[in-house]
Image (tube, rainbow, N blue to C red):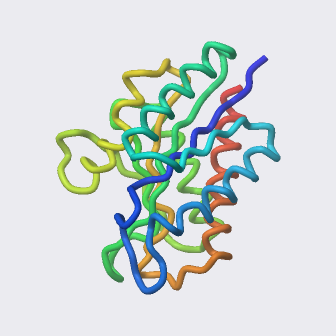
């Protein structure tokens, strides 16, 4: 039996990340993470949501969770999702999904999520490769997901999701939940194609 797993990891630490008006990235993330978790669970996907501890602790526990799941279900596909919101002004892309440049599975997972976000939100969503040497945002994304590739087998991958731009959209609980639903739908569809 295969039981797909998604590990949702809250990006940043308290007081860090993008902010605009009353919305800070760290405080807003649970709104879309919980919505994604509920959508995934309704589709038969196991979910672990990591929010507490330092970012390094969360990253380590995420990799450990995948390893434990794979010990129980060796054929199960797994996706590690580093959850973020971005910022950068009106010219900045609204949704960006990063994948580890070494991972073809990561690339296809990112494409599926990006398509669902663009469809659900009605705004552009792009996919970008992350690597240690890329510089700028791709290098920062790689710092969040690059360890996963080396620690997991070929049917597991990691992506970093910048669901929306906090200084471009008038964010609300409803919009954040909509982002979470689109994320969950994209992940569930991709995992379903792998089992």
Q: Quadrant of residue 41?
A: top right
Residue at image position (68%, 16%) is: 73
At horizontal 65% and vertical 32% (from top left) the residue drawn is: 5
Q: Position of residue 193 (x, y in %)?
A: 69, 33
Where residue 148 appears, as percent x and y from the top left, is: 41, 30
Image quadrant occupied by the C terminus: top right
Residue at 52% over, 85% down? 170
Please tell me how many numbered marks the rendered image carries: 0
Q: Is residue 134 above or below residue 46?
A: below
Q: Position of residue 75 (x, y in %)?
A: 66, 16
Q: Nearer the viewer, residue 122 or 85?
A: 85
The quarter of the picture where the N terminus appears is top right
Q: Relative to 182, is 91 above or below?
A: below
- Residue 96 picture location, percent across and down: 43, 59
Residue 2 is left or right of residue 105, and the answer is right
**Residue furthest front as drawn:** 53
Which residue sits at x=66%, y=28%? 194
Quarter of image, res 116: bottom right
Name above or below for residue 99 compared with residue 10. Answer: above
Q: Quadrant of residue 68?
A: top right
């Amino acid at each position: 039996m295969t039981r797909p797993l998604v590990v949702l990891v809250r990006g940043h630490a308290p007081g860090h990340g993008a902010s605009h008006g009353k919305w800070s990235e760290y405080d807003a993330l649970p709104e879309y993470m919980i919505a994604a978790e509920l959508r995934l669970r309704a589709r038969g996907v196991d979910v672990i949501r990591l929010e507490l501890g330092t970012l390094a602790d969360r990253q380590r526990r995420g990799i450990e969770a995948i390893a434990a799941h794979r010990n129980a279900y060796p054929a199960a596909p797994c996706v590690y999702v580093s959850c973020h919101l971005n910022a950068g002004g009106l010219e900045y892309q609204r949704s960006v999904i990063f994948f580890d440049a070494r991972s073809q599975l990561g690339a296809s997972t990112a494409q599926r999520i990006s398509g669902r976000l663009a469809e659900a939100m009605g705004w552009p969503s792009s996919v970008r490769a992350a690597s240690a040497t890329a510089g700028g945002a791709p290098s920062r994304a790689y710092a969040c997901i690059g360890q996963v590739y080396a620690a997991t087998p070929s049917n597991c991958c990691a992506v970093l999701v910048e669901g929306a731009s906090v200084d471009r959209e008038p964010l609300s609980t409803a919009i954040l939940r909509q982002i979470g639903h689109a994320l969950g739908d994209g992940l569930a569809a991709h995992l379903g194609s792998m089992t």
